[in-house]
Image (cartoon, helix red, strand yellow):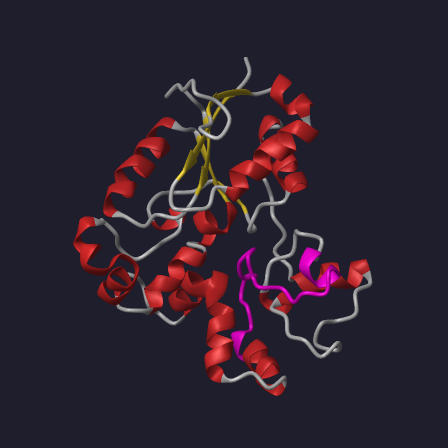
Amino acid sequence: MKPKVAFFEFTSCEGCQLTVLDTLQRHPELLEVIEIVQFREAMTERSDDYQIAFIEGSCTRPSDEEKIREIRTQAQIVIAVGACAHLGGINAIRNRMPLDDVREYVYGDKKDWFETYPARPLSAVIKVDAVIPGCPIDRDEFAMAVTHLLQGRMPAIPDYPLCIECKLTENVCMFLRGQTCLGPITRAGCDAICPSCGQGCEGCRGLVPSPNLGSIKEALRERGMTEEQIDARLSLFLTYQTMQMDGVTPA
């Protein structure tokens, strides 16, 4: 029997699910070996009978937790898809500021109408079996993840820094080009797409194990960045992870 697969979304732009659709168009053979029973971006039919759940988006409301736990109870395997589900994503930037201030800035005098709390990744709410990192995810990595699942193994992501892929691609280091980059502390797996296009890595795939934040901050200072600029650079995708490393956990 084909494994039944469902896709879900929480707070996100749903760009990762669009990447999934693009992947399925490029790899139609995947549709022959799985049965998609729920996918709002692609179909109106839905079923709550599924074995594998791919979830995009971060948890940003107390009411999200109940639905996320329901998915975890039903699914044998839960995969966090993209930076929001994996890291809390850009949504977690709010965690660096008082929540009431954020709500008032966004909603004004209607701030009490909307339920919200500090953003967090799926792993802060439930056990996640595997992740597909990135903003958005990589098409080939998603296809590989599905292939691994069909083979009875969990998708594996690199645990080494992006710099290795830059060297394999024969890129000139962004620092040597007078720019800045978070490649030394960011997980590889995207084929160094941003540095290959002349843009420093922003960290959307998350931190490598045991990242040397002190060294990367010093390297950024040497390139003339202020402490405020460094914090902003590390906050774009890495707020939740870096706050955890500092011993700060959102309430």
Query: Residue 48 at x, y = what percent?
Result: 37, 21
Asked if the stretch drawn in magenta spans residue 201, the answer is: yes
Residue 189 vs residue 115, the one in the foreground: 115
Quarter of the figure with residue 68? top left
Query: Residue 14 at x, y = what percent?
Result: 48, 41
Quarter of the figure with residue 177? bottom right
Task: Name the quarter where the C terminus is drawn.
Answer: bottom left
Query: Residue 243 at x, y = what percent?
Result: 39, 67
Considering the whole magenta stretch, tell me its main secondary structure.
loop
Q: Is residue 166 above or below residue 10?
A: below
Q: Is residue 173 left or right of residue 225?
A: right
Residue 134 vs residue 241, the one in the foreground: 134
Question: Residue lying furthest front in this view?
Answer: 109
Rendered residue at 27%/48% (across/down): 61
Rendered residue at 36%/54% (across/down): 120
Q: Is residue 143 left or right of residue 119?
A: right
Residue 48 vs residue 90, the one in the foreground: 90
Query: Residue 132 at x, y = what percent?
Result: 55, 44
Q: Is residue 148 visible?
A: no
Asked if the stretch drawn in magenta spans residue 87, the answer is: no
Quarter of the figure with residue 70? top left
Rendered residue at 58%/64% (across/down): 202
Task: Name the quarter where the N terminus is drawn.
Answer: top right
Question: Residue lying furthest right in this view?
Answer: 170
Rendered residue at 36%/32% (across/down): 71
Q: Is residue 148 above or below residue 58?
A: above
- Magenta part of the chain: 193-214
Question: Residue lying furthest top in this view?
Answer: 1
Residue 237 vs residue 113, the one in the foreground: 113
